[in-house]
Image: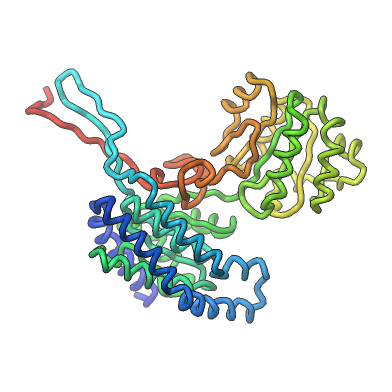
Amino acid sequence: MSDVKKICAEISRQAKEASRKVANLSSQIKDNCLLRTAELILENRHSLQEENKKDLKAAEEKGLSSAFIDRLTLSDKVIDSMVQGLRDVVALPDPVGEVPRMWKRPNGLQVGRVRIPLGVICMIYESRPNVTIDAAGLCLKAGNAVILRGGSDAIHSNMALARIFHQALREFDIPEAAVQVVPVTDREAVNELLKREEEIDLVIPRGGEGLIRFVAENSRIPVLKHYKGVCHVYVDKYADIEMAQDICFNSKVQRPGVCNAMEGMLVHEEIAKTFLPAMAKRFKEAGVELRGCKKTLSILKDAVAATADDWGQEFLDLILAVKIVGSMDEAMDYISKYGSNHTEAIVTKDYERARRFLKEVDASLVLVNASTRFNDGGQLGLGAEIGISTSKLHAYGPMGLEELTTTKFIAYGDGQIRE
């Protein structure tokens, strides 16, 4: 057995053992531990940033992009955000132990469901070290043990954050194995963790499509995933023009490199000549390249002709595919073919068409008259999220505290036996 295999086996065993105690912690102890973690992060800000500098130096020596280095940096703003994130989680109601429903059977048996932790969660993610704290905080609040396998480029930062979390766990007599960062950078560790189905209950990969596909294809454990975010806004013939422009602009431009940014804009042909010229002007001023269908090119002379690869493409950049459609049915057919079940929006003043779009379009969030950028745990009122799932088992959409739990059946009897 290799050293990496031994390490992963021991981490998984310890996490499974710790999960039994974590599942039965009181809300007060969990909250106090998270608040203490927040305090310790602030107290150790300087030492955290010193460890982070080791990762930043290595990244610069490798010639990694400025965007990558930005994601890797534990700036004062990022540290303050981690601290606020923990406080936000504390402010959320504890889902563990909630009984959403009970009912009485004809024989007098009281049957119900109670919300319980999932058990052991394995997070596999890339460069952002703040995910270490975000994921650990959410998992602990939901009563789970968590194994954190961050990117090798952030190993010093992640280990430093784990040490801080462990100090808080010790102070409240919670097993340190409740929150573990995998201490080795060897890629073999990911493969080994994905085999530990006896100890790990769920794997959540967070990063690029390549990472997520690798995890999904190699895991023996259930995986919650989304491969990519190909999100659309359909501008209906009954749309308010000014509202549609604001929504489309925000959906594309506010943060073009995120999974809930608009990648395709569908415009009804009856409104295209009115809507597109002014919309294109706003996009041009923001540096957005428009790649359009033939009908779009007849209206927008500056647009680039779209290729077959542009339909359904996740650009993650200031590039937008634009298609004019003849009907709402055509728009929904396009979304069905090219969407990624992430986020879809319609802009319309027609109530019945809005209702039909909500009912027939399959995505983790379907919006009426609002930006695709709202598919986010914080924006939807979940307080925080561990990621967005586009698979339907067992969660669909942003994964907050409740999605990090499941339910089991309970029954109260007074001597009933089955005939």
Q: Residue furthest left?
A: 415
At a point 15% along the width and 22% down the height, the residue shown is 108
Render colour scheme: rainbow
Q: Position of residue 208 (x, y in %)?
A: 59, 58
Specify whether residue 286 is in view.
yes
Where the C terminus falls, by quadrant? top left
Residue drawn at point x = 63 percent, y = 24 percent: 354
**Rendered location of residue 305, percent (x, y):** 86, 45
For residue 294, side relative to residue 241 (left or right)? right
Task: Confirm whether residue 186 shows in the render.
Answer: no
Is residue 16 shown above or below 223?
below
Is residue 124 found left or right of 349 in the rendered image? left
Q: How many marks?
A: 0
Q: Quadrant of residue 98?
A: top left
On the rendered structure, is 171 left or right of 341?
A: left
Residue 21: % across, % down: 23, 57
Nearer-the-camera pick, 127 or 305: 127
Q: Is residue 299 above or below residue 118?
A: above
Q: Toward the viewer: 189 or 323?
A: 323
Residue 244 locus on image (x, y percent): 73, 34
